[in-house]
Image (cartoon, rainbow, N blue to C red):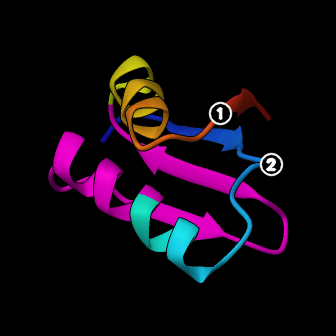
Amino acid sequence: MSDKTTFTVNDMTCGHCVGTVRKALEEALPGAEISVDLASHKVSFTGDRSVGEEAIKEAGYTPEAA
């Protein structure tokens, strides 16, 4: 599997946000290992970095390099 990518998503503020980001990544990167942590605002995933970044953006959030 490819390396893990981590972004900080500061505009992810609640459980609904976590679910939205996770769902967007699951749809964009089927089979990826995904970790979404609300407390630290960190989102990590395996797979194509640019595809994951775009999925987060399309879900309405702002990913920043962690």
Label ID, residue 54 = none
Q: Does residue 12 sit above or below 61 in this rendering?
A: below
Dot 1 alpha-carbon crowd within 10 angstroms: few under 14, some 14 to 19, many 20 or more: some
Looking at the rendering, in which quadrant would you find the N terminus?
A: top left
Q: Does residue 52 sit above or below 31 in this rendering?
A: above
Q: Position of residue 30 (x, y in %)?
A: 15, 51
Residue bearing the label numbered 2: 10
Residue bearing the label numbered 1: 62
Residue drawn 22% across the image and 40% down it:
28
Residue drawn 65% across the image and 33% down it:
62
Label 2 vs label 1: CA separation? 7 Å
Is label 2 in contact with label 1 (beta carbons under 8 Å)? yes
Q: Is 41 situated left or right of 36 in this image? A: right
Q: Earlier in the sequence, mark 2 or mark 1?
A: 2
Residue drawn 46% across the image and 39% down it:
56
Q: Is 26 situated left or right of 13 in this image? A: left
Tag 2 secondary structure: loop
Q: Quadrant of residue 17?
A: bottom right
Is residue 65 visible from the viewing direction of this image?
Answer: yes
* Amino acid type, callout 1: Thr
Q: Is residue 40 magenta?
A: yes
Q: Is 14 situated left or right of 60 in this image? A: right
Residue drawn 84% across the image and 65% down it:
40
